[in-house]
Image (cartoon, rainbow, N blue to C red):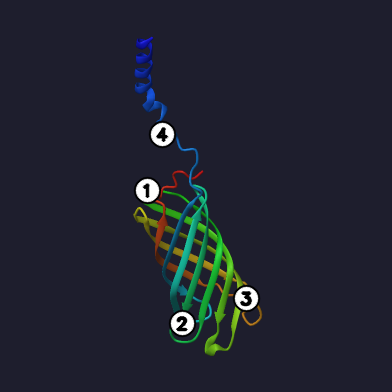
């Protein structure tokens, strides 16, 4: 009986590492988030020269190739009081190629135009189509080059609407160590 107990204890000790080993993960993270800002140069339909300003953006990729993006642009003409401010949100499609993540996006939002000499400050709905690429320079830092074509649904006084084109260079902080989308389903 003593030998049977000793044999049982020995078997238990030898197999205990497999009994108390780590389990396989049963869940993955909900998505992939990055938040950034940048410098924007724009060709506005309202003034003949280029206008510039700053941008804040955030991306949340809830699938390996699909996500949402929110953008804020504040642009001002240095020669007058003309300014354009936009708030946009919409979907994006992306692919991962090593450190490069090219994407295309379609956004909807609101634009506010400050006219010369502060004559008026009017808001318009807008649609945006765009594309760009994020380049991961470190696991949590990426650099962005982004292009947008906006179509403002302007009313009386601006008969054909406003169609600015924007080019942004930015930098973002990526929350989470993985940039490749692993774990997203």
Q: CA distance from mark 1 to mark 3?
A: 41 Å
- Of badges 4 and 1, the one in the foreground is 4
171 and 107: which is toward the camera: 171
Few, some or many residues within 10 Å of mark 3 (<14, 14–19, 20+): some
4 or 1: tag closer to the N-terminus: 4
3 or 2: tag closer to the N-terminus: 2
Please state if 126 lies on the left or on the right of 56 as rendered: right
Tag 2 residue: 77
Few, some or many residues within 10 Å of mark 4 (<14, 14–19, 20+): few
Tag 3 residue: 154
1 or 2: tag closer to the N-terminus: 2
Tag 4 residue: 22
Few, some or many residues within 10 Å of mark 1 (<14, 14–19, 20+): few
Q: CA distance from mark 1 to mark 2?
A: 38 Å
- Of badges 2 and 4, the one in the foreground is 4
Residue visible at 50% across and 80% down? 83
Tag 1 residue: 98
- Determine whether the residue tagged by mark 1 lies in a helix, strand or loop: loop
Q: Position of residue 6 (x, y in %)?
A: 35, 15
Q: CA distance from mark 2 to mark 4?
A: 60 Å
Q: Residue furthest right?
A: 156
């Amino acid at each position: 009986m003593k030998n049977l107990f000793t044999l049982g204890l020995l078997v238990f000790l030898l197999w205990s590492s497999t009994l108390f080993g780590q389990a396989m993960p049963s869940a993955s993270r909900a998505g992939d988030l990055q938040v950034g800002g940048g410098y924007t140069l724009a060709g506005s339909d309202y003034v003949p020269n280029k206008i510039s300003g700053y941008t804040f953006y955030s991306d949340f990729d809830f699938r390996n190739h699909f996500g949402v993006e929110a953008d804020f642009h504040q642009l001002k003409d240095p020669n007058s009081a003309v300014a354009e401010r936009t708030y946009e949100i919409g979907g994006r499609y992306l692919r991962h190629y090593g450190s490069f993540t090219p994407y295309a996006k379609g956004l909807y939002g609101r634009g506010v135009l400050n006219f010369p000499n502060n004559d008026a400050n009017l808001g318009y709905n807008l649609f945006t189509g765009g594309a760009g690429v994020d380049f991961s320079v470190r696991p949590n830092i990426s650099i962005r080059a982004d292009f947008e074509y906006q179509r403002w649904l302007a009313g009386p006084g601006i008969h054909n609407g406003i169609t600015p084109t924007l080019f942004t260079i930015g930098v973002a902080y990526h929350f989470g160590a993985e940039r490749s989308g692993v774990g997203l389903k």
